Amino acid sequence: MKVVLGISNRHVHLSEEDYYSLFGNIEMEKVKELVQPGEFATNLFVTIETPKSRIEKVRVLGPLRSYTQVELSKTDCYTLGIDAPIRTSGDLDDASVVTIIGSNGVVTKPCAIVANRHLHINHEDRIKLGLKDVNKISIKVGNVKRAILSDVYIKETPNGALELHLDTDDGNACFLKTGDMAELLF
């Protein structure tokens, strides 16, 4: 079965508390709806800083969450001089400490991860595809530089739209872009 790819660039999810620390009363505006229902790109950006370096213009995604998480690629981690762990969204165990700089303030906390490869899916589609008892799959990608990528986690949410998320390092290594197709191997 084929599924559409979403190549995920570095971005930030913010808790309500950290949002107000970084932006005060500035209103978060939707700039673009994302494929996953209720998720959107906002008009806001932050700078991510470590003692070694900084990355500016990192997009804030909405809506607000119960935790703050900075999702980076391994290449970004090299730039920042950190060794962020590969984690599922929301799993901040051993997350790297970074400073997030907004227009109104600064937050420093352990919140930087490299998001694992994952397939967004809802329960109905999971059952239809025969993935009920499967937690990880492999995928075949690419036209110019083909590859089989393993350890793609199944991320089931009630309203999940079927979409495969890879970070920019995976995407660039295989000459992929958002909208390309991948073949699920299970």
Image (cartoon, rainbow, N blue to C red):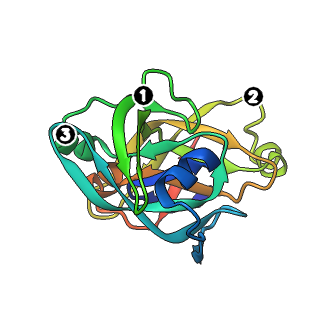
* Distance between the alpha carbons at the discs numbered 1 and 2: 28 Å
Residue under label 2: 133
| Of 108 and 177, the residue lying toward us | 108
Residue at 34 percent of width and 31 percent of height? 84
| Amino acid on which the number 3 mark rests in the picture | Tyr
Left or right: 83 as drawn, with respect to 90: left
Residue at 63 percent of width and 49 percent of height? 16
Using the image, tell me which numbered label, if any, was put on residue 179: none
| Of 182 and 6, the residue lying toward us | 6
> Is label 1 in a helix, a strand or a loop?
loop
Residue under label 1: 95
Image position of 185 with respect to 45: above or below: above
Hey, which quadrant is residue 33 in on the image? bottom right
Hey, which quadrant is residue 28 in on the image? bottom right
| Amino acid on which the number 2 mark rests in the picture | Asp
- Residue 42's x, y, as percent? 54, 70
Counting residues from the start of the chain, the first of labels 1 and 2 encountered is 1
Task: List the single residue furthest toward the left.
Answer: 52
Q: Visible in this render: residue 179?
A: no
| Of 58 and 15, the residue lying toward us | 15
Residue under label 3: 78
